[in-house]
Image (cartoon, rainbow, N blue to C red):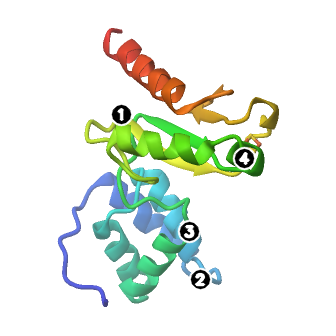
């Protein structure tokens, strides 16, 4: 999958990324660093941005794509307003975190890494928040919720959405 001709808009975000690439292209292995910056600028890494990075660094798009899809901290979809992180660490796992995750995927209609159509929630997973005594645990943005079950978790997310929409 080589870089194909795609239209790259000339806007402030791309200019900022181009400057960053120019400043860092001589450092060894700049790809991950550049992708981090790109994600910071754009919020995620759509194909268009990946092609731009490939072109500017002079590497095949397949290499950029491989790195983006290998590391789960890179996102190829825009993220929602709120990140829902389900802990899949050992303590949470033995207390039913997988059932919670399954229920949430069904309720939100997305898989892990996905974002709801209204861009309200992005579903993610983590390995221990250091709150194992509260297992199973989820974090929504910076807020920790513990001693969950599937019904309680779904209700929390419904309540948060309602609270936001009536603001
Ligand atoms: S294993 Fe879930 S908070 Fe530690």
Residue that appears at 40% across and 13% down: 163
In what quadrant does ligand 1 lie?
top right
Q: Which residue is mark 3?
A: 71
Position of residue 3 in the picture relative to residue 129 (left or right): left
Residue that appears at 23% across and 85% down: 4
- Label disc, if present, on residue 120 of the rendered structure: 1
Q: Disc 4 on helix, strand or loop?
A: helix
Q: Disc 3 on helix, strand or loop?
A: loop
Q: CA distance from mark 1 to mark 4?
A: 29 Å
Q: Earlier in the sequence, mark 4 or mark 2?
A: 2
Q: Which is in the foreground here, disc 2 or disc 1? A: 1
Q: Earlier in the sequence, mark 2 or mark 1?
A: 2
- Label disc, if present, on residue 43 of the rendered structure: none
Can you name the residue that lies furthest to the top here?
167
Instruction: Tell me where residue 159 appears, x and y as whole percent.
Output: 43, 17
- Density class for disc 4 (Cα within 10 Å; few <14, some 14-19, many ≥20) is few
Instruction: Tell me where residue 149 appears, x and y as whole percent.
Output: 58, 31
Q: Which is in the foreground here, disc 3 or disc 2? A: 3
Q: CA distance from mark 1 to mark 3?
A: 23 Å
Q: Which is in the foreground here, disc 1 or disc 4? A: 4
Q: Which residue is mark 2?
A: 26
């Amino acid at each position: 999958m080589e870089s194909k001709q795609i239209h790259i808009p000339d806007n402030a975000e791309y200019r900022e990324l181009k400057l960053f690439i120019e400043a860092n292209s001589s450092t060894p292995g700049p790809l991950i660093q550049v992708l981090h910056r790109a994600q910071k600028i754009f919020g995620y890494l759509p194909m268009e941005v990946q092609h731009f990075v490939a072109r500017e660094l002079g590497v095949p798009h397949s290499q950029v794509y491989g790195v983006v899809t290998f590391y789960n901290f890179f996102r190829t979809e825009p993220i929602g307003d709120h990140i829902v992180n389900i802990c899949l660490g050992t303590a949470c796992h033995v207390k039913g975190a997988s059932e919670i995750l399954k229920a949430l995927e069904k309720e939100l209609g997305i898989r892990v890494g996905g974002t709801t159509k209204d861009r309200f929630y992005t579903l993610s997973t983590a390995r221990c928040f250091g709150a194992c005594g509260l297992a199973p645990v989820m974090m929504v943005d910076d807020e920790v919720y513990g001693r969950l079950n599937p019904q309680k978790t779904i209700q929390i997310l419904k309540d948060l959405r309602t609270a936001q929409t009536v603001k």
